[in-house]
Image (spheres, helix red, strand yellow):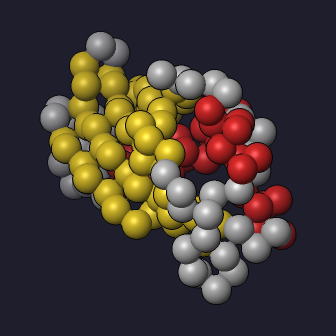
Amino acid sequence: MNKNIIKKKIYYHDTDAGGVVYYANYLKYFEEGRTQYFETKGIFTEELLKEGIAFVVAKAEIEYKKPVRYKESIDIITGIEEIRNSSVVFYQEVFKGKNLCCRARIVVVCVNKNMKPIRIPEQIKKLWRALE
């Protein structure tokens, strides 16, 4: 299965009062991972928006395993689990070294400018499937 990995350093603003990454920030990290995944496949959000196409999160399942702290570095791993007619299921993981810290299953839906679900354009599906 094809995946993309980005590296991120944890800054003070990422953490809570205890110096541990605030749980909601993982949603931001996963968004960064999906954005980078799209871009490495030649799919750019700003171009899609000009065409009246967007991908929005419909469901997020997150499992927190180990804490990540201020000044540590993480790897955000993103891959596709399943491509459907109008949605795609991403699997995402955060590792600190070899330790799994967090994992998620995120469902994004392809929508038009009125936020109504539409079929994922074939050219996008082809880019994703060519690399599976």
User: Looking at the image, which residue is at 61% across and 47% down?
Assistant: 35
Q: What percent of the width, then of the height, locates residue 2?
A: 53, 23
Q: What percent of the width, then of the height, locates residue 88?
A: 49, 51
Say left or right for 112 vs 132: right
Say left or right for 106 vs 39: left
Residue occupying the far bottom of the picture: 114
Which quarter of the figure has residue 127? top right
Say left or right for 72 vs 86: left
User: Looking at the image, which residue is at 82% across and 59% down?
Assistant: 47
Judge whether 23 appears above or below 127 on screen. below
Q: Which residue occupies the foreground of this view, 74 or 118?
A: 118
Res. 5 in view: no
Res. 21 in view: yes
User: Looking at the image, which residue is at 71% across and 56% down?
Assistant: 121
Q: What percent of the width, then of the height, locates residue 6?
A: 54, 29
Quadrant holding the C terminus: top right
Judge whether 77 appears above or below 30 on screen. above
Residue occupying the far top of the picture: 98
Q: Which residue occupies the foreground of this view, 2 or 14?
A: 2
Q: Which residue occupies the foreground of this view, 21 or 7?
A: 7
Q: What percent of the width, then of the height, locates residue 38?
A: 65, 43
User: Looking at the image, which residue is at 28% across and 38% down?
Assistant: 103
Q: Which residue occupies the foreground of this view, 129 or 50?
A: 129
Say left or right for 43 vs 66: right
Which quarter of the figure has residue 117? bottom right
